[in-house]
Structures are given as C-alpha cells and as structure tokens.
Image (cartoon, grey):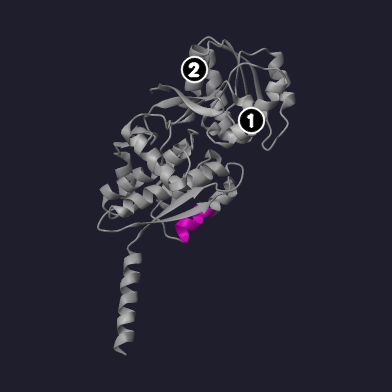
Amino acid sequence: MKKSILVLALLACVSLVFAQDIKIGGIGPVTGEAATFGISTKNGMMMAVEEWNAKGGVFGGRKVKLIFEDDKGDPAEGATVYTKLIQQDGVVAIVGTVMSKVTLAGAPICQANGIPMISPTSTNEKVTLVGDYIFRACFIDPFQGTVGANFAYNDLKARAAAAIFDLGNDYTKGLAENFKKQFEKLGGKVVAFEGHPSGATDFKAQLTKILQAKPDVIYIPDYYNDVGLIAKQVRELGFKGPLVGGDGWDSPDLVKIGGTAVENGFFTNHYSSEDTRPIVQDFVKKYKAKYGAEPDALAALAYDAMYIMLDAIRRAGTTKGSAIRDALKTTDLNVVSGRVKFDENRNPIKSAVIIEIKNGKPVYRTTVNP
C-alpha cells in the first residue's frame, strides 16, 4: 500500500512539472511546395527551444514545450493548425509560419484569440497589419523589392528590366510590384511584367514575351522550385544576363533544380552564414553539429523568432497574451540576423544581404542597410 501511495505521489509530481511547461506553437510547411523551408524552420525553432531549456527555461524554472504543426504550404491547412494549437493544445504564443499566404490565414485567428505570434519569414507587408498581436522577424517586401531594384540598377548597371512572378502568391506579386516601382523611380524601365499561374511548369510563353522586350536583367521573385525551372527555360531561350530574386531562392534545391542556369543569379536575403560576427559563426557551428547541414536564412530567422518570443515571455514574467505582446513591442535584441527593434507596425528594422550563386554555391556579395 505504501509503495502504491509513493508511486502515485511521484506521478503527481511529474504531472505538476509538465503542467508548468510553457506551450509554444510552431508552424511551417514541412511537406508541400516549400518543404525545405519548413524543415529548416522547424530545425531552427527546436534548436532555440533546446538552448533555452538547457539554461533553465524561461522564468521560474518553467521550460518550453514546442508543439510543431505542418501547414503544408496551404492557407486552409494553416488556418486549421493555428486553430488546433490555440483551442486544443492551449499554446500561449505561436512562432510561424513561413509563407505569407498561409500566415495571412493564421494571423486573424491569433489576433481574435489574443495569442501573440511572430512569423520568421512572411515578408508581405499585410501580415502585421492584421493586428497588434502580430509580429515578424524578417524585413518586408517593400524593402526587399527596393533592395533588389537598387542592386540591379546600381551594381549590375541594368537599365531595362523584366519581371516574371506567380499570380497566385501575394509574396511574389508584392516583390515584383515593389521592384518595378523602385526600378522606375531610379530611372530604369520595366519592359515586361509577366505573371504565371500557380503550379505552372512551362513558362516559355511568358519568357518569350520577356525576351522580345530585350531586358538587361530579369527579376524572378518566386520560390526556389519555380525559379530553377524558369532559369533553365530562359537560358534555353538564349538569355545570358543576370537573374535577380528574393529570399524565396534560399534553398539547396535551387541549384539541384536549376543547375548552371542559376549562375549569374543574385537574391536578397536576411543573413549570410559567411557573416563574421561571433553570434553568426556560433550559430552556424552549432547548427552544423546538430543537423549536419549549413543553416539557411529560414533556419536563422526561425531560431531568431523563437529567441525573440521567449525573451519577451521572460521579460513579461507571465504567459498572459497582452503582457507578452507588450514585451514584444519593446524588444531590443541582438540575434543572428542582426539587431532587432520593432517599428510601429511590428516590423523589424534591420539590414539585408545580397547573395550570389557562384560555382553552384550561394556566396555573400554585400550588405544593404535600411
């Protein structure tokens, strides 16, 4: 009888410990069209959580329990997993998700439930405008599109540009529109502006129109899978000039799909593993040791986003949503992708880098400050 009582007491203590865990939701597309993004995102979040737990948790000895869900890159699925994490799992905050179109489906759910969320990589400017519980760890499309245009005009000396983008994706449309606006503001001319259907694999009709306009540079703000195909097809049609894009290029599968066609390609990104800052090199070393791979920007931003969220919860000293939100607003934190403070729309003020595809590898080219 005494032994049974002791066992029950131990079980009660274990249950109490687990009841004190702070549940954080994580969301990313580990399957679907942007699966490599989701895998990197999950890895970055997990590494950050493990580091916080190893140091004793967030506050009062309370450790973090990460509950990660796959949104499959689909807005409907995203809405489902956001709802599940909040209503069934009882998370106090969410870090996610990757793709702007999915984040825009989940953000209103967080806002309505008073659950603070921070997207690691959703760059569409509409995301944080959903409400005051919504934050992001990355720069936004107007800045990224502007940086791409500045680089094409000033560094590549292009004067005639074309763009091809996914009509069904707010992210790619936003980048293309902001690139066009800035390129023309600088004095350049956008000679072709072609959209393609989501899921397309043959882009030759659009590319033929583009090449007839004789651009110096082609802006391709799509995700890596489409970019690889577009690059191969435009090279087959005879274009030898530079290709420029956004952070959607940042995947090892870009070169696997595009091969040598993506050489002379450049893209805006949030960080470079070649950055010599100690915080970057320490992150790269730990990530390689844990996952056996070079961390991409998705991994870095997910790691940063989780750190930003847990730092805010620590400073709030509570799991109350409004208190975490208020702590997030006063963030001033040095993370892998740079020093982060938030503006009035909860967007971070930070720099961007230009990455060049050279000899089949992404190589740091330059940094652009805000």
Q: Which residues are magenta?
A: 81-88
**Magenta segment, prevailing SS (helix, strand or loop):** helix
User: At which x and y percent is residue 311?
Assistant: 30, 46
Amino acid type of the residue that numbered disc 1 sits on in the rendered structure? Gly
- Tell whether position 185 is magenta: no
Q: CA distance from mark 1 to mark 2?
A: 22 Å
Tag 2's secondary structure?
A: helix
Amino acid type of the residue that numbered disc 2 sits on in the rendered structure? Phe
User: At which x and y percent is residue 330?
Assistant: 29, 39
The number of callouts visible is 2
Q: Nearer the viewer, mark 1 or mark 2?
A: 1
Residue at 41% in and 29% down: 274
- Tell whether position 85 is magenta: yes
Residue 258: assigned label: 1
Residue at 32% in and 69% down: 16
- For this orientation, the residue located farthest to the bottom is 1
User: At which x and y percent is residue 191?
Assistant: 64, 14
Tag 1's secondary structure?
A: helix
- Residue 345, relative to residue 15: is it above or below? above
Residue at 55% in and 54% down: 80
Residue 281 falls in image quadrant? top left
Quadrant in which the N terminus is drawn = bottom left
- Residue 65, relative to residue 208: is it above or below? below
Is 256 on the left or on the right of 96, as rendered? right
Residue at 72% in and 14% down: 212
Q: Residues within 10 Å of mark 1 (few under 14, many from 20)?
A: many
Which residue has dot 2 on it? 151
- Asked if the residues shown at circle 1 and circle 2 are in contact, with their CB atoms under 8 angstroms apart, the answer is no
